[in-house]
Image (spheres, rainbow, N blue to C red):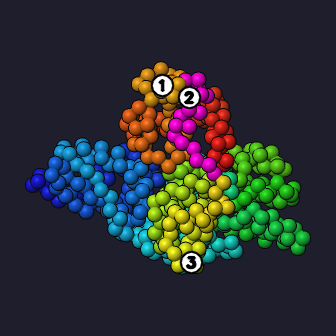
Amino acid sequence: MAELNSALNSDIWQLIKNNIISKNLDNKPLLMWLEPTALIEVEPQSDSHCFKLSVPTELHKYWISNNLLEVISSEISAIHKSPFLVELIVTGHANTTNDDFDRLMPVAPTSPVDDSLNLVKNTKIHSNKDTLNPELTFSTFVVGRNNEFAHAVSYSIAENPGTENYNPLFICGPTGMGKTHLLNAVGNYVRLKFPHLTICYCSAERFLNECISAIRRGEMHKFRQRYREQCQILLMDDIQILGRGEAVQEEFFHTLNYFFEKGQQVIVASDRMPKDILGLEDRIRTRLEWGLIADIQMPDIETRVAILRYKAERRGMSLPQDVVSYVARISKRSIRELEGNLNKIKMYAELQAKPITLDLARKVLATHDDTKNITMDEIQKLVADHFKVRVIDLKAKSRTQPLVTARQVAMFMVKKHLDKSLVEIGRNFGGRDHTTVLNAMHRVESQLSENSDLKRDFDEIETRIHNITGV
């Protein structure tokens, strides 16, 4: 115990964090979640020690539990050779000495906005009519497998606008997936870190309308000044609208060229890929494809649960776990739908002066819930039938390649469509370790973009699952 106290005095947790950070310098999402943690104490127990770590919010606790716990445990093991447990405790305080994280991470779960948001509110607006939303920051963006790449690239650009090989950045995804949130997050971050830069955040519709108005009034010189000479960073939303007019596309094309020649950052968002925007000129399409395209899709059940918990926390709501699971399961169309369902439950509970329960949630969302339940056994059978193997083989120890692929796809599908933990999934696939499930998910995710045959298999199984669930 004396040795342990000595280690604590030398700041064992800071050493562990430094080790993790040094091995993951390129993983900015990981660093954002890890930095606010602190070691409260190491409590001796009967046959082990309990490392109690403080985290600022429930969302931090959830994300770290699902994404960082193994990494943390591995680093503790390398230093502390005795058996131990790790417990995460929500304290409502960010524990960090890093100035950037102090400004950008939420430090109190009961506060509607953090210090960085208040600073943004007090920052001078540089000639923008469509002002940035101060609540849409990186600290309020929930990262999951569906948006991790888009988040990481956006954060990297915000730290070094115009200097990375990500110009332009094209964020693509269906409506309500967080594209606008990322545009605002970049703008808010840049305003804090680079206050000398002028940001132009606008919708493509505003750009189109102002361009047409300027043409009619003979004031194109003012229009070009506003969007070129008076702006160092261009953030434009919903650019699929630009396919409507030739004159507007001409101006947009020259605006893009102006920014590229000056080495200034452009980030645009759209609900479709450049090649799918009807009426868009080829010269604009090629320039948009010249940079980097980051795709965002609907979050999986795990990320939807994290988003729901965070949204509820921001509203001061206490949601039972069964309500969280239910709302996350039926809200599969967009994040806005997820938030809308939460608002309905909150309003109904307040009007009726009733506590939030699963029965109340089902009553409020009865007309919205058109989904049917699918079980793990059913998913295993669908995958087994598709790959022409037996379900019992998915749970066996065989390592033949076709069977390994089928097993990994089945694990991935179960995690995506059911609210099951990695441990529970592994248990239902022949008692496998949760790390095996995690590796399977990473393997399938990486292969989907490279293996067209696997992608075709994946899509066919997805279709069959959707035919059962109705979504």
From the top left corner, tell me how far across and down residue 308 is, in percent.
52, 61
Residue, x 85% and y 57% (percent of image)?
Answer: 244
Q: Which residue is mark 3?
A: 352
**Residue 100 sits in quarter:** bottom left
Image-based side of 168 in relation to 1, left or right: right
Q: Residue furthest left?
A: 2
Which region shows up in magenta? 371-389
Residue, x 47% and y 35% (percent of image)?
Answer: 440
Image-based side of 26 in relation to 93, left or right: right
Q: Amino acid at mark 3?
A: Gln
Say which label, 3 or 1, has the lower sequence index. 3
Residue 69 visible, this orientation: yes
Residue 109 is one of the magenta-drawn residues: no
State whether residue 416 is above or below residue 339: above
Residue, x 84% and y 70% (percent of image)?
Answer: 214
Q: Are marks 1 and 2 in contact (CB under 8 Å)?
A: yes
Q: Which residue is mark 2?
A: 384
Image-based side of 379 in relation to 110, left or right: right
State whether residue 13 is above or below residue 350: above
